[in-house]
Image (cartoon, rainbow, N blue to C red):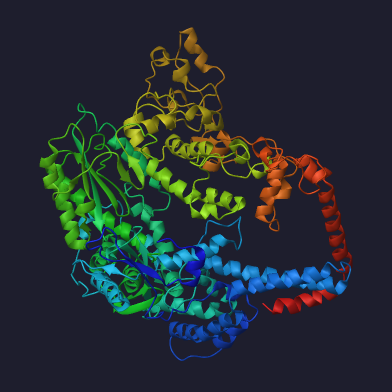
């Protein structure tokens, strides 16, 4: 059933039900309204209220009251007392969209009256005041729509355009659930029955009885990468400072959904001068006592559909909306904990660890799957394990044992356990909270602390398998993995286990996952887990049965949203990704945006999508569009140069031998071995590796090898000399100098002086000419290209060098220039407006429709020759001049205060 925007705005609660076809070949559709009436909605603080002149006085009136009780209790009571005040203020504001329409009507009337006497000071002031009222009303409406539409990508382009209203209506409609199917096949349509089904499901998943086992994982410490030292543990429990508290609150996004108390971070930021001291005392109270009020840790479960048309409760993702006070506490804990993760978490786990990249998992997985289609290579296998309801099923007693395992101090563990184990839940359904139950397990999706705790939980699985590998003795590593002891790649709950394709290795993985499941509560989802075997492996039926009858997977395999395959990546493999991008750009969002808004949409999605299935004429060449604004373009980055710039970051990490990256470590061990990235042949390796190697010659002029002692550089393979790698210029150099190819540069340096062996071959003698200076100390690799230090942006400037600037770019930048007008001006400067002198528009006639004097409609005529345009310019100048002359003095300034007070 298709409906338009007007329908959604007028009847947002309507829905339809498809009945049984029975003997007919058609299914009747029954359109229903919300016959049971709307539920009472939750309180939501609208961010635009913080801009009101009465906001701070209202907060101050409540906040000056003294409340007996703890500091946290006093804050929650005052927040509750403010709710009816803000409800009344919102009611007084009325419908913001109606206010904008009224303001536009007042301005139209004022300008119509002004047209009769353009030099009347009173009328000019009236017009000015009406404009100010419209501007303020539009700003409030825009603020409200941004908060409700949650379109963070649209920071420029359209302001209060139709897309915001459509987005708000679509979000509201998509979140409403009027019927649901149960696990036994029944369809529930009544609102009470649907609500009860959601509450029952999540109460069984998150509630119930808390498991309370004594679990000790300290026997895994010999296999741990690191255990926190005493100094590191003490740093975690240092007293919390007021600056930490304020920073944590101000780091929270203002548009994020609020918790059960309804207050967004915008309230705390705007009211901080009044409430800051008491809020800080409430946070300090938690870290002093380790106790959290139940209302502070209350949680609303927001339902996000996993599929386009969810029919069962399991097809919704539960996102926990927590109160800002709780988020502030957990953000402080996270800020302290995240500095320890890099030393605690294995390099093969790249999620939520500062400094690590999701790209490492993808690149290394692609390398390991290379050759799976070849029979002559060793038998290999990969187990892609999907964990069922990963965050929601973590047992709390196991989490405490994990924190103890890694050496977190008892006080820090107490803080975390108090936050994790004291939540209460209500389910937000159709805009209102329903039910109330206490949690018994799980990490909340939406809690800032949950991702970091989860990677610690997953690290325990790594330690369990490491223990089994060393104690079992029958495990065989995957081909090209044994030297770095690699058996898994993890990104949060996305897990791939690698081994040789034999029964003992697969059985070991099964045993490790079984033990981990019993301890943690996390279980493998067999329906979504896959066993991928190389062509050289044993019959798949034999090995698949070992892994709980899991499904046999095939390449290409989707991993972290991208296809993994054993051969070259083709356009067909990328079609699902391209279709998603194309749908977002050319869908309803793009259809309702102006050109300026579409520019911002393209920037937010992928920087560009150069093709489209629709036929038409490009107004400006894509090459011009992708230039910076200072060079006469729209500032959309060139997608090819952007891709090369991002790839260069991976190449730079290889050059710097960044062994904190598991992918770089693997490349140095198996791809390069005794060679350098500068001299290895590009013909071998995976398709992605060959593409990466082709960039080295372009980057070479921007990289300087500064010689300290020479021990970190290769004598023959690194480009420490301005002429490049020595082995490239003198292939026989190692033989003639008797210096092996793997020798470091320090072989020919002694006490900061070049010391070369006696050379008789005339060609090799040239090696010792024009040698660079020796600086002593540590060897350094420096970026001498754009921007002074290597970044992806600096590499982008290499592949897309800056061009000549234009002198009119200042016309297109600035806060007060309307984006749509800027775009039209840009098209006019390019000479690409749709004037009728264009060949494809000549069927409309070529004469100017404004002056109707028979002149052809061209850019030059419209802007410089047309008599009608000249009269418009003359009228506009006189109108502006009259406002400037009669608008001087303090009278306008005095009036502004009165007009501003209206809003």
When the figure is inspected, residue 581 is found, relative to residue 332, above or below; the finding is above
The answer to whether one can see residue 239 in this image is no
When the figure is inspected, residue 153 is found, relative to residue 108, above or below; the finding is above
Residue 674 image point, x, y percent: 35, 27
Q: Is residue 884 left or right of residue 709?
A: right
Q: Residue at x 35, y 25 (%)?
A: 684
Q: Nearer the viewer, residue 385 or 169?
A: 169
Direction front: furthest residue: 24
Residue 73 image point, x, y percent: 43, 85
When the figure is inspected, residue 203 is found, relative to residue 494, above or below; the finding is below
Q: Nearer the viewer, residue 441 or 462?
A: 441
Q: Nearer the viewer, residue 615 or 719?
A: 615
Residue 56 image point, x, y percent: 61, 80
The answer to whether one can see residue 46 in this image is yes
Count how many numbered circles sit on residues in the image: 0
Q: Residue at x 59, y 79 (%)?
A: 94
- Quadrant assignment for the C terminus: bottom right
Q: Residue 271 is drawn in which quadrant?
A: bottom right
Q: Residue 401 is drawn in which quadrant?
A: bottom left
Q: Residue 901 is drawn in which quadrant?
A: bottom right
Q: Is residue 784 left or right of residue 573?
A: right
- Quadrant assignment for the N terminus: bottom left
Residue 508 image point, x, y percent: 15, 47
Q: Is residue 262 left or right of residue 441?
A: right
């Amino acid at each position: 059933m298709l409906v338009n925007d007007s329908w959604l705005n007028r009847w947002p609660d309507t829905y339809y039900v498809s009945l049984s076809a029975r003997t007919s070949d058609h299914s009747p559709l029954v359109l229903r309204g919300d016959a049971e009436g709307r539920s009472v909605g939750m309180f939501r603080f609208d961010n635009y209220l913080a801009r009101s002149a009465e906001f701070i006085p209202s907060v101050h009136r409540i906040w000056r009251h003294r409340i007996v009780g703890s500091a946290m209790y006093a804050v929650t009571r005052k927040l509750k007392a403010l709710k009816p005040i803000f409800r009344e203020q919102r009611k007084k504001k009325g419908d913001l969209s109606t206010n904008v329409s009224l303001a536009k009507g007042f301005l139209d009337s004022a300008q119509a009256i002004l047209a009769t006497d353009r030099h009347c000071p009173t009328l000019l002031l009236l017009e000015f005041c009406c404009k100010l009222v419209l501007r303020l009303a539009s700003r409030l409406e825009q603020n409200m729509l941004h908060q409700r539409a949650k379109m963070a990508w649209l920071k420029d382009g359209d302001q209060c355009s139709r897309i915001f209203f459509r987005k708000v209506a679509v979000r509201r409609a998509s979140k409403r659930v009027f019927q649901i199917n149960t696990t036994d096949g029944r369809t529930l349509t009544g609102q009470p029955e649907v609500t009860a089904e959601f509450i029952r499901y999540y109460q069984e998943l998150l509630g119930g009885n808390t498991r309370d086992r004594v679990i000790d994982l300290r026997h895994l410490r010999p296999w741990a990468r690191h255990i926190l030292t005493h100094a590191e543990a003490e740093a975690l429990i240092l007293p919390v400072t007021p600056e930490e508290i304020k920073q944590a609150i101000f780091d929270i996004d203002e548009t994020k959904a609020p918790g059960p108390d309804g207050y967004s971070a915008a309230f705390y930021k705007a009211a901080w001068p009044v409430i800051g001291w008491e809020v800080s005392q409430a946070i300090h109270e938690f870290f002093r006592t380790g106790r959290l009020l139940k209302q502070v840790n209350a949680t609303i479960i927001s339902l996000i559909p996993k599929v386009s048309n969810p029919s069962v409760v399991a097809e919704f993702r539960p996102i926990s909306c927590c109160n800002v006070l709780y988020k502030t506490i957990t953000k402080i804990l996270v800020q302290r904990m995240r500095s320890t993760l890099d030393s605690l978490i294995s390099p093969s786990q790249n999620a939520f660890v500062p400094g690590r990249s999701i790209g490492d998992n993808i690149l290394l997985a692609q390398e390991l799957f290379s050759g799976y289609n070849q029979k002559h290579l060793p038998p290999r296998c990969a187990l892609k394990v999907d964990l069922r309801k990963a965050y929601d099923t973590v047992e709390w007693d196991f989490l405490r044992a994990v924190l103890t395992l890694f050496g977190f101090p008892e006080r820090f563990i107490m803080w975390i356990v108090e936050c994790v184990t004291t939540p209460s839940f209500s389910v937000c359904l159709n805009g209102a909270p329903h039910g109330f139950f206490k949690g018994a397990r799980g990490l909340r999706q939406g809690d800032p602390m949950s991702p970091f705790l989860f990677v610690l939980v997953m690290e325990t699985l790594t330690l369990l398998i490491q223990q089994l590998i060393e104690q079992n003795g029958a495990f065989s590593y995957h081909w090209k993995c044994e030297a770095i002891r690699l058996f898994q790649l993890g990104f949060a709950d996305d897990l791939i286990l690698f081994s040789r394709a034999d029964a003992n290795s697969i059985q070991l993985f099964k045993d490790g996952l079984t033990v981990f499941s019993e301890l943690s509560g996390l279980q493998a989802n067999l329906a979504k887990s896959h066993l991928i075997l190389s062509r050289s492996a044993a019959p798949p039926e034999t090995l698949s049965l070992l892994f709980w009858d899991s499904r046999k997977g095939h390449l290409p395999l989707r991993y972290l949203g991208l296809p993994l395959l054993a051969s070259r990546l083709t356009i067909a493999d990328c079609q699902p990704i391209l279709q998603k991008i194309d749908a977002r750009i050319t869908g309803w969002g793009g259809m309702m945006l102006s050109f300026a808004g579409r520019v911002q949409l393209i920037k937010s999605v992928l920087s560009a999508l150069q093709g489209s299935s629709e036929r038409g004429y490009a107004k400006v060449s894509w090459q011009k569009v992708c230039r910076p604004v200072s060079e006469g373009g729209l500032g959309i980055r060139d997608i090819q140069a952007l891709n090369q710039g991002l790839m260069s970051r991976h190449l730079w990490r290889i050059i710097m031998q960044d062994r904190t990256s598991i992918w770089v470590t693997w490349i140095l061990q198996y791809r390069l071995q005794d060679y350098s990235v500068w001299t290895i042949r590009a013909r071998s390796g995976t398709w992605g590796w060959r593409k990466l190697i082709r960039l080295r010659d372009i980057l070479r002029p921007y990289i300087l090898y500064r010689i300290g002692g020479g021990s970190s550089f290769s004598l023959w393979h690194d480009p420490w000399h301005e002429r490049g790698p020595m082995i490239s210029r003198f292939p026989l150099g190692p033989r003639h100098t008797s210096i092996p190819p793997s020798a470091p540069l320090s072989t020919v340096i002694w006490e900061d002086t070049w010391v070369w062996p006696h050379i008789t071959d005339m060609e090799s003698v040239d090696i010792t000419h024009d040698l660079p200076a020796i600086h002593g100390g540590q060897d350094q690799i420096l970026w001498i290209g754009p921007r002074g230090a290597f970044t992806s942006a600096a590499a982008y400037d290499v592949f897309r060098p800056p061009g000549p600037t234009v002198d009119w770019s200042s016309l297109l930048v600035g806060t007060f220039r309307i984006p749509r007008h800027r775009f039209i001006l840009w098209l006019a400067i390019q000479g690409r407006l749709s004037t009728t002198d264009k060949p494809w528009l000549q069927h409309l006639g070529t004469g100017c429709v404004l002056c109707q004097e028979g002149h052809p409609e061209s850019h030059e005529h419209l802007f410089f020759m047309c008599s009608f345009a000249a009269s418009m310019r003359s009228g506009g100048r006189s109108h502006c001049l009259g406002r400037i002359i009669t608008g001087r003095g303090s009278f306008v300034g005095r009036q502004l205060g009165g007009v501003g007070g209206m809003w």
